[in-house]
Image: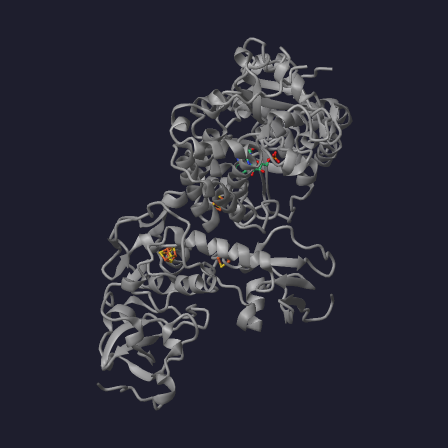
Amino acid sequence: MSETNPKFKVTIDGVEVEVDPGTTILNAARLIGGDVVPPAMCYYSSLQGSGGKCRTCLVEVSKGSEKDPRPMPKLVASCSTPIMDGMEVKNKSSEKVMDARAGVVEMLLINHPLDCPVCDQAGECHLQDLAYEHGKSTTRYEFERRTFDKVDIGEYIKLHMTRCILCYRCVYTANQLTDKREHGVLKRGDAAEIGTFIEKNLKNEFIGNVIDVCPVGALTDKTFRFRSRVWYTKPMDAHRDCKCCSGKAVVWMIGDEVARVTARKDQYGEVKEFICNECRFEKKDKSDWTIEGPRHIDRSSVISANHYEVEAPSHTPLLNKA
Amino acid sequence: MDRKLLLEHIGVEGIQTHDVYRKQGGYKAVEKALKSMSPDDIVEEVKKSGLRGRGGAGFPTGMKWSFIAKPEGVPRHLLCNADESEPGTFKDRYLMEKIPHLLIEGMILSSYALGCNQSYIYIRGEYMYVLQILEKAIAEAYANGWLGKNIKGSGFDLDLAVSTGAGAYICGEETALIESLEGKRGNPRIKPPFPAVKGLWGRPTVVNNVETIAAVVPIVNEGGDAYAQIGIGRSTGTKLISASGNINKPGVYEITMGITVEEFIYSDTYCGGMKNGKKLKACVPGGSSVPILPHYLVCKTAAGEDRLMSYESLSDGGFATGSMLGSGGFIVYDEDQCIVRNTWNFSRFYHHESCGQCSPCREGTGWMEKVLHRLEYGHGKMEDIDLLWDIQRKIEGNTICPLGDAAAWPVAAAIRHFREEFEWHVNEPKLCTTKNYGLVTEKKFEPVNA
Ligand SMILES: Cc1cc2nc3c(=O)[nH]c(=O)nc-3n(C[C@H](O)[C@H](O)[C@H](O)COP(=O)(O)O)c2cc1C
Ligand code: SF4
Ligand code: SF4
Ligand code: FES
């Protein structure tokens, strides 16, 4: 291959796409979009080293490459397997994959508290979506579920470990965004838990981002906890002059009030530009923000089913004055 | 035909010390290698010898060594895996305890072959007293010029250090071992990249078992071809077997690959037959991770041929009727033992040892343990047997590291071969809490003594 810009061809569920060498199967699928994209509960493109753990993104490689067409003997994690030229991958079209994925979802749920009615993440929880798509309505697990005490990690963040799926995203966030490592995993196996070096000790300008990366309701914003169901809020793109971060955020309004502030997430629920604690936790006045207009929320949030976006005249900060 | 390559001098008084070891021909291989062999020559001899990894997977050692990346100016590392935590396996401990200089000599030869100047032995934390033996031996090796700068004037430098684990089986998995050695939590890494390319501190690294490294000594002394003459087929040389269970003489034996399983269990040279004249019920031939074999598949394969102590013969028949040589942890069960209890016990181990990184292993191992516990204690249901089958199936092959498979296989094999024993536990909820299945059934196990 001597051309200046060699591309690899890969086929996923029968759809062909050309990608740069080194691209993972998952990212190739995301270039295609739609149904061929495997669900990803632990991979997070902006967090180095993430992925490989949850196993929800398993796919079947039915042809290894043009050079070596043998299928791969086991299902592989699409988020951490690079594509080869001529590779053929099956996601939704493989029964084996669907079966294994249902198994993974079942495993993720056996110890999950399923307290969705009182969980702040409800409505924008990736596990809820995944369970809806791949799970069963009954459980075969008849033992007591694992529980942990809720703890405050720092002034603004609540850790409800019982809901955690150990995706390690918050660990990578704490390691990569903050300057002092004080957040990690303690113990092992199903006793493993997220812990901070000294409980209540998460003080750092960027640590609030662990809330955004958490796919479930294990890490929640204490300034927002139990204030409202997410579907009663209206997300607006907003920005402010911030010395610490880009100041680009989403403010979730209830009437004229800023109920919570988050970073902006893409269609896969991933934050590309992290925000600082000041923006997230302390700027709760509408006048703190320049409101740009309704935020388009894709997938994984009930908000995406909301039609207020179309109804709202763009760039109008005041909506739905009740 | 009974060759001892590793344990030949084990009975010699003081063999733990450098001077006695040296008198018995110790460090001759290092002298020979540094004087007359290039690193590639050693790799070549190891390839010729057919030596396969003794840590469990049986990967050809010479081939593994030839995969190590050699980028300019980047140090490489050899790590000796002495984490030995697989239930039923205790051969590495024996070797390090009885003849520590053999491992050190093997480390020097292997490091030289791979071009490593800083090598490590990662030893299981519970082996504290062995650590002391090793450290003493290493100090002697330094004092006698076998380690350090410019070894015996050859220009080759090697530093050797021992590092201890802290009680985690998972740190025997090579990438978890590397993480642990780097001072991190012992979570297995996601591969690729493989250690041969990016291992310890991102440098090319080889991880080998204690016994594998020790076997390099006789290979260098006698030549790869001579080593390959010993054994059978692709199972060359000798193998240390840790024998335990209901046998007369539990212990560590060095066998020539290819002797029959029957000879190993019944001859006085090895296990000395079943204890108390009981009959053989089952055998786990390669450590707790490998499938259990019912009595009729222990000494004979499904095809009726003699089962041999070799990689190929023990896995003859695949998982349907065979097992694996694994780490050589040979556990024998007599007719009184309870397979459900044994499976629960293994399951408890894997549940306790899972690192918890991936969902199927983290959640599935605990689930299996709970279901097995319920069956063993008379609260089980008939559906539990199929449930167990399904859980193990959902774990196997879907995890980051082979611990998931290792947790699944013993459960699958026990159900495959001893399903009626599981059913009995459901049908006899009272009896099964007071007596082992083996003690109450009239079932006759075919005598396998010739
Ligand atoms: C959970 C787990 C535990 C392991 N424990 C050990 C061990 O204690 N000792 C060992 O030599 N290999 C162990 N292995 C195998 C190693 O990963 C590796 O394959 C081996 O050290 C390679 O050495 P060899 O090629 O000389 O056999 C373990 C593997 C797994 C998955
Ligand atoms: S707390 Fe949330 S982000 Fe952190 S490991 Fe658990 S599920 Fe993942
Ligand atoms: S298979 Fe088990 S031990 Fe291995 S990485 Fe996954 S959770 Fe950890
Ligand atoms: S997203 Fe690939 S394993 Fe979790």
Q: Visible in this render: residue B168?
A: no
Q: Nearer the viewer, residue B214 or B253?
A: B253
Residue B54 lies left or right of residue A224; in this view the side is: right
Tell me: residue A37, above or below residue B439. Answer: below
Quarter of the figure that contains the N terminus of chain B: top right
x and y percent of residue B5 in the render?
Answer: 67, 19
In the displayed orientation, state which residue is furthest to the bottom: A313
x and y percent of residue B444 in the render?
Answer: 57, 20
Residue at 42% of width from left, 23% of height from top?
Answer: B435
In the displayed orientation, state which residue is furthest to the top: B13
Residue at 42% of width from left, 54% of height from top?
Answer: A108
Tell me: residue B201, above or below residue B12. Answer: below
**According to the image, what is the colour scheme of the structure?**
one colour
Residue at 76% of width from left, 29% of height from top?
Answer: B233
Quarter of the render that holds ligand 1:
top right
x and y percent of residue B336 in the render?
Answer: 49, 20
x and y percent of residue B419 in the render?
Answer: 53, 35
Q: Which of the 4 quarters of the picture holds residue B33? A: top right
Quarter of the figure that contains the C terminus of chain B: top right
